[in-house]
């Protein structure tokens, strides 16, 4: 709360932005902030369903989704070796999820793991979308320097 108070105070003293454009800009940047808020809280739910090693392995899918969304939303061309790298990363992540034969594993544990994997994929997709959306916002304003 302190951080937002300081930010609003500094923003109100700045006279470089018009109020109408400022409110639109605030809402545009609120979208990735909300995405990251949901994603950061989703991580705790995921960790209650899978172990830390599986979570780290599944987190590699962020790169896969970022590459694909980069192509889809920003219209950038990817070279053959970039597609091969994405395919290799996705294949490696999928291979890491091949279940090992463990005796005495319960069906409830399997369902929990499946839920964790699905939530992990959702988390990776949200993270990639938030990053691509932020980049699109920055690239669409060439006159503003960062």
Image (cartoon, rainbow, N blue to C red):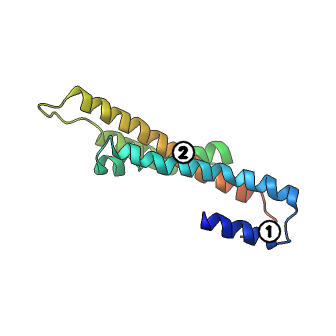
Residue pictured at 74% horizontal, 72% vertical? 10
Q: In the figure, 100 relative to 19: above or below?
A: above
Q: In the figure, 17 relative to 30: above or below?
A: below
Indicate the quadrant containing the C terminus: top left, top right, bottom left or bottom right.
bottom right
At numbered mark 1, what does the secondary structure look like: helix, strand or loop?
helix
Q: In the figure, 10 relative to 34: above or below?
A: below
**Residue 57's x, y, as percent?**
34, 49
When asked about the image quadrant of residue 120, the answer is: top left
Relative depth, front residue between 145 and 106:
106
Mark 1 and mark 2: span between their CA atoms?
31 Å
Other-residue count near label 2 (Cα within 10 Å), few / some / many at <14 / 14–19 / ≥20? many
Residue pictured at 48% horizontal, 44% vertical? 123
**Residue ID for mark 2:** 126
In the rendered structure, find residue 12 and report the number of the disc placed on it.
Answer: 1
**Residue 19's x, y, as percent?**
86, 60
Relative depth, front residue between 144 and 14:
14
Indicate the quadrant containing the N terminus: top left, top right, bottom left or bottom right.
bottom right
**Residue 105's x, y, as percent?**
17, 31
Other-residue count near label 1 (Cα within 10 Å), few / some / many at <14 / 14–19 / ≥20? few
Question: Would residue 85 be found to the left or right of residue 73 on screen?
Answer: left
Q: In this view, which residue lies farthest toward the left?
A: 103
Of marks 1 and 2, the one in the foreground: 1
Residue pictured at 29% horizontal, 51% vertical? 53
Relative depth, front residue between 29 and 88:
29
At numbered mark 2, what does the secondary structure look like: helix, strand or loop?
helix
Q: Is residue 122 visible?
A: yes
């Amino acid at each position: 709360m302190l951080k937002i108070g300081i930010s609003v105070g500094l923003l109100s003293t700045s006279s470089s932005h018009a109020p109408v454009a400022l409110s639109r800009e605030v809402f545009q940047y609120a979208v990735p902030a909300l995405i990251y808020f949901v994603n950061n809280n989703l991580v705790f739910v995921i960790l209650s369903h899978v172990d830390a090693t599986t979570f780290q392995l599944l987190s590699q899918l962020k790169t896969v989704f970022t590459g694909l969304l980069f192509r889809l939303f920003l219209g950038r061309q990817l070279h053959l070796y970039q597609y091969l790298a994405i395919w290799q990363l996705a294949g490696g992540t999928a291979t890491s999820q091949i279940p090992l034969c463990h005796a005495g594993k319960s069906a409830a544990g399997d369902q929990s793991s499946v839920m964790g994997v699905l939530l992990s994929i959702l988390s990776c997709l949200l993270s990639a979308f938030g990053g691509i959306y932020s980049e699109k916002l920055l690239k669409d304003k060439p006159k503003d320097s960062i």
